[in-house]
Image (cartoon, grey):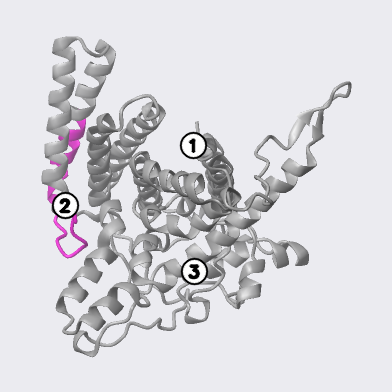
Amino acid sequence: MGIIQASIPLFFALIALELLWSQATGRRVLRLNDSLSDLSCGILSQLAGIFTKLFTVGIFIWVADRWRVQRWLAAVPEWPERAPFVAAAGFPGFGVDLPALLSWGAVFVLVDLCYYFSHRYAHEVNLLWAGHVVHHSSEEYNLPVALRQSALHGLMSWVFYVPLAFAGVPWRMFVACNALNLVYQFWIHTRAVGTMGRWTEYVMNTPSHHRVHHGVNPEYQDKNYGGVFIVFDRWFGTFEPERAEPVYGITKPLRSWNPLWANVHVFVQIAKDAWRAERWSDKLRIVFGRPGWRPPELGEVERPKPVSVATFEKFDPPVPTPLAAYGFAQFAAALVAAFLLLQAAAEIPVSLAVAPAFFIAVALAGVGGIFERAKWARPLETARLLTTAAACGGLLWTGLAPGVVAWGGLAFCLVSLAVLWTYRRELTQVELAPLM
C-alpha cells in the first residue's frame, strides 16, 4: 500500500475533527455538495493513477537508468537509499545512519523545489493550468479541498521532476518523498488554524500561507506556490502574507459539482478559443501562454476583479433532502467500490481495472448531477442503476458472488430507482454545466 493510500484514514479523521470544530465555533466551512464534489475529484485522481503512474514513474526510471550523472562521472557518488534509522546493537531503540539521513533529507528538499516550479508553471501556462484548475475550483477552503486533485495533471507535471532522475535520485526515494510532500499539504487546507509563530511562518508552508494561494482576490493571485517550505516563494519573489480573509475559487467560477467536467472544462475552453483564433501565433499563445489571455477578436483578456467575502455569492443550488440523501448514498457506494478497486489494483492486470473505473466515474458524475438538479442526471442515473441491477441479477443467477452481496446490490438499486423517480421532476436544471 502506498503512503497516500495508507494516510486515507488519517485524512478522514482530520476531516471529522474539522467538522467538530465547525460545529463548536458556528463557522460553516463544509457543505455536503461541495465536499462530495471534492472527494469525487480525489477518487477520480486516484483511479487515474492506476493507469498514469506506470507512465510517469516509468519515465523517471528510464531516464535515471540511462542518463543519470553517476554513469558518466565516476567521482559522483550514488545516493544512499538505505533506511536512515537502524537498530543499534546492544542499545534499545534505533540508531541514525547519518549519510542515509542526509540523503533522504536532501531528496525531500529537492522534491519540494521541483514541486515549487511545477506548481508555479501550472498557474502561468494555460495548458498546465487546465490540469491544475481542478484543485482551485472549490469555493470553500477546508480539508476535503486538499483531496480535490486532477486526474490529468500528472501526465504533464512529471517533466519538472526529471532533473532529479538526471541527478541519479533512486526512483523509490523520489516516489516516497513526493508522497510525503503531498501528505504534508493536506493539513494546511483549513481555516481552523491561524498563524503559527514567526519562525514556523517564515520557513514552512502553513494554513495562512496556503489560504492566500487559494484566494481569488487580485492581490493574492499567483502567490505562495510552496508545498512543504515557503522559503522558495520568499527567494523567488512569489510570497504574499495573509492580510485579509480570502475569497476562494477561480476567477471564472465552475458552477458545477460534476467531477468529470471539473477535470476537462478548461481544456474544452482552450480548444474552443484555439479553434476560433485567426493566427497560428495566437493559437499557440492560447495553449501555452498565461491563463486568461485571448486575442482581440475573442474578447477582452480575463483579469481578476476585486471581490469580498461579504458580497461573493457561492454556487449552492438547493436540493430536496431525499434527493440529497440519494446522492450521498450513491457517493458512499462509489467510494466503497473505488476503495476495493484501489486495493486490488496491484494484483490485477491494468486492463481489468478499466471497466470498474469507468462505472465509478459515471456514478460520481451522476452524484454531481443530482446536487446540481441537472436534467441529464435522470437518464444517466436510470441507465446506471438498471445496468447495475442487471449485473447483480446475473451474479445471483450464476452464483459468482455471495448471495448477500448480490441481493444487497439488487435491493440498493431498486430502492435508489424508486427515490430517483419519485423526485425526478426536481431534476430540471439545464443552464448549469453539462456532463462533458
Residue at 26 percent across and 57 percent down: it is 261
Which kind of residue does numbered mark 2 sit on? Answer: Leu
Q: Is residue 406 above or below residue 169?
A: above
Residue picked out by circle 2: 427
Query: Is 218 displayed left or right of 430 in the figure?
Result: right
In three-dimensional space, the C-alpha distance between marks 3 and 1, rounded to whole angstroms, equals 26 Å
| In this view, 48 is above or below 214 | above
What percent of the width, then of the height, locates residue 52? 36, 45
Quarter of the image where the C terminus is located: bottom left
Q: Secondary structure at mark 2?
A: loop
Q: What are the residue bounds of the magenta stretch?
A: 415-436
What's the amino acid at mark 3?
A: Arg
Residue 81 percent coordinates (x, y): 65, 39
Residue 28 visible somewhere in the drawing: no
Residue situated in front as seen by the camera: 317 or 248? 248
Query: Mark 2 or mark 3, which is nearer the start of the sequence?
Result: 3
The percent coordinates of residue 412 (x first, y second) are 23, 27
Does label 1 or label 2 sit earlier along the sequence? 1
Sequence order check, earlier mark of 3 and 1: 1
Label 3 or label 2, whichever lies nearer to me, is 3
Comparing 69 with 180, the one in front is 69
What is the crowding at mark 3: few (fewer than 14 residues within 10 Å), some, or many (at least 20)?
Answer: many
The dot on residue 5 is 1
Q: CA distance from mark 1 to mark 2?
A: 35 Å
Helix, strand or loop for disc 1 = helix
> Nearer the observer, disc 1 or disc 2?
1
- Judge the density around disc 1: few (<14), some (14-19), many (≥20) Cα neighbours within 10 Å: some
- Which label sits on residue 120? 3
Residue 329 on the magenta span: no
